[in-house]
């Protein structure tokens, strides 16, 4: 049973170990509270969330939801980088902590969180450990502490179970449901004590566990001191914490001085931290609450266990909740499988249920659980070899076991300022946020000021990943598409997830604009090269974050100078060119000339090293060459020198040994187009390949591809190029031709169908035929057709007869 | 020394099976020799030895890799459907089906060997024509097939390589599996053979040559399918090699101890070539030929035999590599090149890091030709 402690404060303190998210645990927690009727229930959880307890226990609030903790390290307590930090504390309907809060509320018992506040936990953790792990979705939940020790490994081996989760399900969930609460908690405590013993202290200190436990112990004592009963009656305090901490708390509380010392041992001033942290509640989804989705936040199969919880709560006696849930799931999966093309009979479902029951018996489980369910579907629903083509039933089961849907918060739940800002902006722009239907909006972004503002707002919402809006049409600066369009068409839809997403980014600022700007700053720090940074610049452009423009502009400049990746520079050039063309329309007042000059010079300096590329990067490289040709031509007036340097670099490339044949063709195309090479020169180069060794001859196809990419009009001047093509086809055998076909097909994609017809005509003339001889088939006369049909019928009759 | 090369499972583990039966306290399905729990213990081993007739029996684990799969197989066989084991060659499907039959029915030899030439009468029944002519159609003149025997006696029938038989012949199992009755029209009213409790079918099919895709869906519905995957851990593979080789050596009176270090070399080679990535993270070209654990056992055993009869009864890495060549160059020549590449990268790095036997192994690459 749980530890019972008597202290000098005349309080009886009971420590209840729990595992976050466990139906059986939640069930027993309620039982203990109702039977023991404590005066207070103290719960593991950052104490800066105490104000949220009334919202959590409100009848209108439905799980899953999460407490969202944010901390902005303005004073550099945690690291010099002064970053934003956030973490979640997810709750499901069957989280023991939530059940404890709810039961306490129903019985008029006071309750509170007793852990260090979020910022303090961060300050107590070592870099990269505990809540300072580099993870986008850090969870306050620390059940993982129970699952990774050597003791457990041996336990699983001995009991023949696959994992901690299966071990837990068998002993604590299924068999444990039928135990009385005292036995159940004493079993859990034994397990936790052994798990704790097998975890080194050093690890605990790094994860911040020791500091947290000290704080919790002193919190319990303080609470007891503060709420002493006047009449000399003994006070009863129930402490609900993760099982991993219970043995340590018991030890600390029994050595009272230790517990009190904890309060003094803090490294940082609480007030420094408190003013920089905030806490909110947000609706959560079942998918995000499932441990299998990579959010180590407790048990897997959230949807399955929710079914179990619904089966056991409010019931006088436990009667086979697992059996019912397994059957439900088998039928649901069967229904889904039948919807697809796979057939599945009722008999399959019967066999699956028998399998689940048989396995539970073989494995000494009182009822079949999640693992038997999985095995039953695998054995009875999957027909044939188990692989990607046949695993649909198992995938469906996985989805159903995760569950779907989101939680809901009651009215009056505190929201961060960013949501207030969002609501206000929606109102002022007339965006509908009271319907879950999708709305469409057309914005003339370059003519109406208000339209441009709405567009900026929507772009910011997209940047913040809120899934509120998406652009269906309009100039796309990132993909460099549709730059001639003057209007943007948007579709937007409000849902509770938009709020969750906004809360998620609320750590970055109080308004949508502020959060976007702050995130731009962070991305900018992480930007890998000039390409990335220029991409970000296009986004800043669309979002209209004029304050950020200069910083991003400078960073792009810096990165262009540092970057040595040819393709990254090309990407940057492409984005800059786009911005340069559209800068006037977006009215940013930013001048891109200098930046373009720097990028072009960098590009030219890298160019000669690109001569010997492989065929798989040929297209990209050719596009880059063409791009620069266009830039230097369009900006001829102020890029005269760069243009000369560019052609010099091309010249240098042509002289490189082993230059890629495609690139060679492409360069000669450009030189011809700019009047620096005559058609005869190009023909001579081509003939060089044709008459070269076998390997070089085979390269001719790639050469043509490059040539047609930049100078396809050469084909239509005289017949010489067509003649060369003809010669080439004559020189290769049919096997080789098949090998070359992909390259040739690529080469001819640069021509329109009409042009290909024209080329075919010239080719036909080379062989003494006319175009129509090869492009038109002669007509089949009706008499011929009739004769053929009769012949067929006659033959058929003969064969049958 | 035993007289046969490979005695059936029920012979080899006779005492173990008897001890398990004698101490079995679980519920036993009709006509089974022991309870499902005891079958599980027989195949997956028990941590504690069992005591029977004053003697202790240590039940070793006989099948490695996937305990849940074995449990599913046992439950399937106690139910109404047949069991179909599918997987790559050399993943111990046949061994598992033998173990299951020996434990459940006490016989693992009631087997149909599927080939392209298997006909319907080999599956159902045929006639002793001399008796048929002399006495007319009677039970005496009927030659029962393993399926017939299984139904008559209430034991398991194993159908090896079921997918090698033509699909229409496979389909003759459909009515037997669903109605549990076989009709012999020649015997008139007495021609109905109703299957006794305990009868079921275990099929095995290999996915490499001719998979189960061509099997009719009607027949598929009569089976629960279990896909047997290659062993996931190199350490387990090493254990399997050692166990199997010891068993083979014992059966053939080869008095030579298996060398654990050499088994480790071989296990990691097979494991890495099959998975396409080494324990040190190198990416490796996977050979086309089957790199199964069974193949590794045979390479090891062959080396052992050579060293026993022609050498000094100690394992040699040179000899191992020579046998490895024979095992991998079955399908095409490129495989050997891939193994060479593996030696020149992975084994080279390991020999530099670990030295010792790995170094010898690397030097033995000269035999790869």
Image (tube, grey):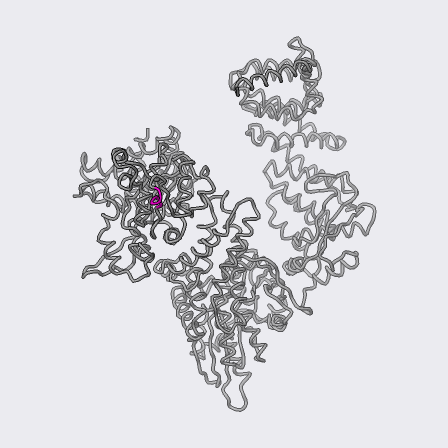
Residue A584 at x, y percent in the picture: 79, 42
In the displayed structure image, the side of residue A513 where residue B165 appears, left or right:
left
In the displayed structure image, the side of residue B105 where residue A407 appears, left or right:
right
Q: Would you place residue B195 above or below residue A367 in this image? A: above
Determine which quarter of the picture holds residue B350: top left
Q: Quadrant of the C terminus of chain B?
A: top left
Which residue occupies the extreme right position in the image? A447
| Magenta stretch, main secondary structure class | helix
- Front position in the image: A252 or B162: B162
In the displayed structure image, the side of residue A470 where residue B369 appears, left or right:
left
Asked if one can make out residue A463 in the rendered structure from this viewpoint, the answer is yes
- Front position in the image: B168 or B14: B168
Residue A155 at x, y percent in the picture: 36, 61
Q: Residue at x 35, y 48 (%)?
A: B194
Q: Quadrant of the N terminus of chain B?
A: top left
Q: Residue at x 63, y 27 (%)?
A: A649
Magenta range: B188-192
Asked if one can make out residue B273 in the rendered structure from this viewpoint, the answer is no
- Front position in the image: A416 or B223: B223
Which residue occupies the extreme top position in the image? A768
Which residue occupies the extreme bottom position in the image? A231
Q: Would you place residue B367 above or below residue B241 in this image? A: above
Figure disc tally: 0
């Amino acid at each position: 049973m749980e530890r019972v402690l008597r202290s000098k404060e005349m309080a009886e303190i009971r420590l209840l170990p729990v595992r976050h998210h466990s139906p059986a645990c939640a069930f027993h927690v309620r039982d203990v509270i109702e039977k023991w009727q404590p005066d207070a229930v103290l719960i593991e959880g950052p104490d800066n969330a105490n104000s949220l307890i009334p919202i959590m226990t409100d009848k209108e609030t439905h799980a899953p939801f999460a407490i969202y903790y944010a901390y902005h390290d303005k004073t550099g307590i945690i690291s010099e980088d002064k970053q934003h930090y956030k973490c979640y504390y997810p709750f499901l309907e069957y989280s023991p902590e939530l059940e404890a809060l709810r039961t306490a509320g129903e019985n008029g018992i006071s309750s509170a969180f007793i852990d260090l506040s979020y910022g303090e936990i961060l300050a107590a953790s070592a870099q990269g450990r505990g809540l300072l792990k580099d993870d986008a979705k850090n969870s306050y939940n620390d059940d993982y502490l129970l699952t990774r020790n050597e003791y457990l490994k041996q336990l699983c081996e001995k009991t023949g179970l696959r994992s901690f989760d299966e071990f837990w399900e068998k002993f604590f969930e299924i068999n444990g449901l039928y135990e009385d609460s005292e036995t159940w908690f004493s079993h859990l405590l034994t397990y936790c004590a052994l798990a704790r013993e097998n975890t080194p202290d050093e690890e605990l200190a790094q994860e911040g566990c020791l500091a947290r436990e000290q704080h919790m112990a002193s919190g319990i004592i303080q609470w007891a001191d503060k709420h002493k009963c006047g009449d000399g009656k003994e006070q009863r305090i129930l402490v609900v914490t993760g099982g991993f901490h219970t043995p340590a708390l018991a030890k600390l509380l029994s050595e009272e001085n230790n517990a009190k010392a904890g309060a003094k041992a803090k490294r940082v001033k609480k007030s420094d931290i408190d003013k920089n942290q905030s806490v909110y509640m947000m609706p959560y989804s079942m998918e995000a609450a499932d441990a299998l989705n990579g959010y180590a936040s407790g048990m897997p199969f959230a949807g399955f266990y929710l079914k179990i919880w619904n089966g056991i709560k409010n019931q006088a006696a436990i009667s086979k909740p697992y059996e019912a849930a397994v059957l439900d799931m088998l039928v649901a999966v069967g229904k889904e499988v039948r919807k697809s093309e796979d057939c599945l009979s009722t008999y399959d479902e019967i066999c699956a249920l028998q399998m689940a029951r048989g396995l539970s018996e073989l494995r000494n489980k009182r009822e079949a659980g999640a693992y038997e369910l999985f095995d039953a579907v695998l054995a009875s629903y999957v027909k044939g070899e188990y692989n990607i083509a046949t695993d649909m039933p198992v995938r469906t089961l996985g989805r159903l076991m995760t569950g779907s849907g989101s939680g809901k918060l009651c009215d009056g739940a505190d929201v961060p300022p960013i949501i207030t800002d969002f609501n206000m902006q929606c109102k002022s722009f007339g965006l509908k946020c009271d319907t879950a239907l999708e709305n469409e909006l057309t914005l003339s972004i370059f003519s109406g000021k208000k339209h441009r503002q709405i567009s900026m707002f929507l772009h910011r919402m997209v940047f913040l990943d809120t899934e509120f809006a998406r652009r269906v049409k309009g100039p796309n600066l990132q993909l460099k598409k549709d730059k001639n369009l003057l209007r943007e068409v948007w579709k937007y839809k409000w849902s509770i997830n938009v709020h969750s997403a906004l809360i998620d980014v609320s750590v970055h600022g109080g308004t949508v604009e502020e959060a976007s700007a702050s995130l731009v700053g962070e991305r900018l720090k992480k930007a890998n090269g000039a390409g990335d940074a220029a991409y970000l610049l296009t986004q800043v452009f669309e979002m209209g974050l004029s304050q950020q423009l200069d910083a991003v502009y400078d960073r792009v400049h810096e990165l262009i100078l540092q970057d040595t990746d040819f393709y990254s520079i090309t990407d940057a050039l492409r984005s800059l060119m786009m911005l340069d063309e559209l800068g006037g329309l977006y009215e940013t007042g930013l001048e891109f000339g200098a930046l373009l000059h720097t990028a072009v010079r960098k590009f030219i300096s890298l160019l000669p090293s690109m001569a010997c590329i492989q065929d798989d990067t040929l297209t990209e490289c050719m596009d880059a060459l063409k791009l620069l040709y266009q830039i230097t031509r369009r900006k001829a007036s102020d890029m005269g020198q760069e243009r000369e340097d560019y052609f010099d670099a091309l010249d240098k490339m042509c002289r490189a040994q082993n230059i890629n044949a495609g690139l060679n063709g492409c360069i000669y195309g450009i030189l011809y187009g700019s009047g620096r090479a005559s058609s005869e020169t190009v023909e001579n180069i081509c003939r060089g390949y044709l008459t070269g060794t076998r390997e070089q001859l085979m390269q001719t196809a790639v050469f043509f591809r490059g040539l047609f990419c930049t100078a396809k009009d050469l084909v239509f001047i005289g017949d010489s190029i067509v003649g060369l093509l003809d010669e080439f086809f004559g020189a290769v055998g049919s096997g080789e031709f098949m090998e070359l076909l992909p390259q040739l097909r690529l080469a001819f994609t640069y021509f329109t169908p009409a042009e290909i017809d024209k080329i075919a005509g010239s080719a036909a003339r080379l062989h003494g035929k006319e175009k129509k001889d090869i492009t038109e088939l002669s007509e089949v006369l009706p008499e011929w057709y009739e004769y053929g049909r009769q012949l067929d019928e006659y033959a058929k009759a003969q064969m049958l007869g | 020394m035993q007289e046969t090369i490979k005695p059936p499972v029920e012979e080899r583990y006779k005492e173990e099976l008897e001890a398990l039966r004698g101490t079995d306290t679980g519920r036993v399905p009709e006509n089974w020799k022991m309870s499902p729990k005891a079958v599980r213990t027989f195949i997956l081993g028990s941590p504690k030895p069992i005591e029977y007739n004053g003697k202790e029996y240590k039940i070793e684990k006989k099948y490695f890799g996937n305990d849940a799969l074995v449990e599913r197989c046992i439950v399937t066989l106690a139910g109404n459907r047949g069991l179909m084991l599918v997987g790559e060659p050399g993943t111990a499907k046949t061994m598992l089906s033998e173990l299951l039959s020996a434990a459940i029915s006490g016989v693992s030899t009631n087997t149909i060997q599927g080939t392209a030439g298997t006909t319907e009468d080999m599956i159902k029944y045929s006639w002793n024509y001399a008796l048929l002519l002399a006495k007319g159609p009677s039970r005496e003149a009927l030659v029962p097939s393993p399926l017939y025997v299984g139904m008559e006696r209430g034991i398991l029938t194993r159908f090896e390589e079921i997918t090698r038989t033509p699909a229409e012949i496979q389909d003759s199992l459909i009515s037997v599996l669903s109605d549990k009755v076989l009709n012999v029209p020649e015997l008139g009213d007495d021609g109905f053979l109703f299957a006794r409790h305990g009868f079921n079918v275990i099929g095995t099919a290999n996915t490499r040559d001719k998979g189960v895709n061509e099997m009719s869906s009607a027949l598929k519905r009569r089976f629960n399918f279990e896909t047997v995957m290659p062993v996931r851990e190199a350490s387990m593979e090493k254990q399997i090699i050692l166990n199997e080789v010891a068993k083979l050596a014992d059966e053939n009176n080869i008095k030579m101890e298996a060398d654990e270090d050499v088994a480790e070399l071989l296990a990691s080679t097979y494991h890495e070539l099959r998975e396409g990535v080494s324990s040190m993270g190198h990416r490796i070209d996977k050979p086309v030929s089957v790199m199964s654990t069974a193949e590794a056992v045979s390479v090891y055993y062959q080396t052992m035999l050579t060293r026993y009869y022609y050498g000094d009864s100690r394992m040699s890495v040179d000899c191992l590599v020579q046998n490895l060549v024979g095992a991998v160059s079955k399908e095409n020549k490129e495989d050997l090149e891939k193994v060479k590449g593996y030696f020149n990268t992975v084994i080279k790095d390991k020999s530099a890091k670990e030295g010792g036997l790995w170094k010898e192994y690397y030097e033995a690459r000269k035999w790869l030709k």
